[in-house]
Amino acid sequence: MTVLLLASQSQAASNRPPASQGDDYSTSRYRGEVYLLRGFADVFSGGLDQLGADLARAGIPAKVVNHGAWMSVGEKIAANQKRFGRKPVILIGHSLGANSAISMAQQLKKTGITVTLLVTLAATAPPPVPSNVRKVENHYFKSGGWGEMVRASPDFRGSLKNLDHSGKAEVGHFNLDDQAAIQKILLRAVRANF
């Protein structure tokens, strides 16, 4: 059954648009950056593809990438912020992508870049959120699911919310990002902070 599920999910992943790191900006077009980091093998994070499409329709340039690209994406953000000036940086990750989003925030802290909003969905082993993040929304499962609570580093002074989705029927680690209610929350949060 597991093999069938993975084959089915793999087929769904192959029908998705490829992960991209976005286009090059001009000074007049650079408004900030929104990155959506998929989980393991780009298989279980289809909700991020939908969110990326919804953000594009709202005029917000969002890029969907594999969680393993976090370091090169962080370097790209740092280069863009240096070249075009400080603008909002929003990071959203699902599963391993949630862990990577926090790691990217830690990387950006070393270059003095603020992360306006960090959203984590079912993080599996999240490192502490660094002090350069202004606002964190973590969607996790206290029980009955696979996704951990996020904690802040000792010098963190921003806003951190851990939102528990335990006990919600048919909502789990692999489909948390697909939920219509969560999609609306994420879209609203990005629009409010971009």
Image (cartoon, rainbow, N blue to C red):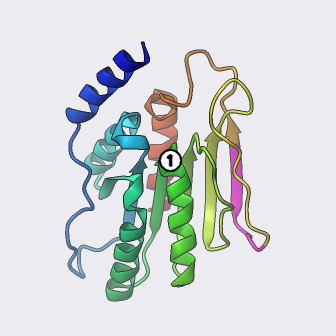
Q: Which residue is label 1 attached to?
A: 96
| Extreme residue in the top direction | 1
Q: Is residue 39 visible?
A: yes
Horizontal side of 66 relative to 119 (left or right) equals: left
Residue drawn where x is 52% and y is 42% of the image:
95
On screen, 79 above or below 191?
below
- The residue segment tinted magenta is 155-162
**Pick the front one: 110 or 162:** 110
Residue drawn where x is 45% and y is 36% of the image:
183
Q: Is residue 60 visible?
A: no
List x then y, in percent, for residue 7.
30, 23
**Pick the front one: 117 or 194:** 117
List x then y, in percent, for residue 60.
32, 57
Q: Is residue 157 magenta?
A: yes
| Extreme residue in the right direction | 154
List x then y, in percent, for residue 82.
38, 87
Residue drawn where x is 43% and y is 30% of the image:
178
Q: Quadrant of residue 1?
A: top left
